[in-house]
Image: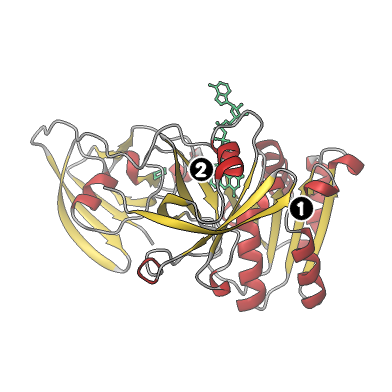
Amino acid sequence: MPEVHTLTVAEVIAETGDAHSVVFELSPDQIEAFRYRPGQFLTLRIGTAARCYSLASAPHEGSRLKVTVKRTEGGYGSNWICDNIRAGSTVDVLVPAGIFTPADFDEDLLLFAGGSGITPVMSILKTALRQGNGRIVLIYANRDERSVIFGAELSTLVKEYSDRLVVLHWLESVQGLPSEAQLGALARPFAGFEAFLCGPAPFMAAAKQALEGLGWGRKRIHLEKFVSLGGNPFETEPSEPDTGETTELHVDLDGKQHELTWPRQRKLLDFLLDKGLEAPYSCREGQCSACACRIVSGEVKMLNNEILDSEDIAEGIVLACQSVPLTDEVSVTYE
Ligand SMILES: Cc1cc2nc3c(=O)[nH]c(=O)nc-3n(C[C@H](O)[C@H](O)[C@H](O)COP(=O)(O)OP(=O)(O)OC[C@H]3O[C@@H](n4cnc5c(N)ncnc54)[C@H](O)[C@@H]3O)c2cc1C
Ligand code: FES
């Protein structure tokens, strides 16, 4: 079973006309399970569905967790949250997940955010200012001035960290949609910075192409894609029929080595959780990449993959929640 916690809403903040922040208060026994890295997200149960929302708070700000939800026109979950969640509401939530987080907060960072894509970027930015010593450039695109989430907070941070933080606002109402060439021109002076991108798909595609055109290696470009989960990771799946065939599995997880006998029909994540190992995950559907790991030797087959690209796969990255073994021996690392 996934680790589900019921969290209490301490406060709801109207950030803009169509974006609400929901602040959760943790009870003392929930604090350990909800430790997170900047850039990670929570998965909320909404009726019979589930939706992921990035944490806009930063770990050093205390034990309150903040997600910021922007209404999607015609969307089920975002509108339900903005219309119904109030202080005192309770919500079922999965523990933090995701890999959109800098390995080193002393790096120089080039951050691209579009609309609600500011949420994980804000957490990364605040942490890097507080903990690191690198320079930070944020290129932040919005429809118009009224839709800028965290505008006042960013202005305060720019004043406080004027020697390290630059925020470049792009308003579609004034400048039109940002093109690849325009984003490239903004990014050009910051070659060598580690890049983090989050926002609408066309914005991320333009920013990624611009960076690649300027010679950024793909390992220095990190993307967080906002999609709605199709299934419901709060429900357990029925287990598959046992064929009796097995694979010898070697797993490197959290610095510990494990040797296990893996039933061929069982998905890697389900099997590791069966064995009591704390492997990361969120959607369990091949849509979020929270469960990503790397195959060191042997082969697996992914039953579904909606998030990894061909370059990830060429590097041996797979989604544990969708991987079943093809060879007699498989070695996996979560480094
Ligand atoms: C890791 C991660 C982090 C995220 N972080 C954030 C965040 O911080 N803030 C945030 O606001 N969002 C975030 N999201 C996105 C969020 O999870 C939801 O996808 C978003 O809120 C929209 O959900 P919804 O239920 O409102 O819309 P949905 O009901 O999923 O609908 C989305 C769109 O599809 C259309 N649609 C729905 N059903 C159909 C259908 N059958 N046929 C045709 N069209 C249809 C709707 O009209 C709507 O335009 C994140 C997603 C991920 C994966
Ligand atoms: S848990 Fe989301 S892709 Fe595997």
Residue 163 vs 272, above or below: the answer is: below
Q: Can residue 88 be seen?
A: yes
| Residue that extends furthest to the front in the rendered view of this protein | 88
* Residue marked by disc 1: 140
Q: CA distance from mark 1 to mark 2?
A: 27 Å
Callout 2, which amino acid? Glu
Left or right placement of residue 105 versus residue 31 in this view: right
Dot 1 alpha-carbon crowd within 10 angstroms: few under 14, some 14 to 19, many 20 or more: many
**Would you identify the image quadrant in which residue 189 lies?**
bottom right
- Amino acid type, mark 1: Tyr
- Residue at 50% x, 46% y: name it: 52
- Please give left or right for residue 164 compared with residue 76 in the image: right
Q: Residue 45: x, y in percent?
A: 43, 43
Q: Secondary structure at mark 1?
A: strand
Looking at the image, is mark 1 or mark 2 nearer the viewer?
A: 1
What residue is shown with label 2? 311
Front one among 183 and 199: 199
In this picture, residue 326 sits left or right of residue 192: left
Q: Position of residue 300 (x, y in %)?
A: 29, 40
- Residue situated in front as seen by the camera: 208 or 34: 34
- Residue nearest the viewer, comparing 239 with 71: 71
- In this rendering, the count of numbered labels is 2
**Does dot 2 land on a helix, a strand or a loop?**
helix
Question: Whole-percent x and y of residue 1?
Answer: 26, 47
- Local crowd size for mark 2, using a 10 Å CA cut-off: few (<14), some (14–19), many (≥20): few
Quadrant of image for the C terminus = bottom left
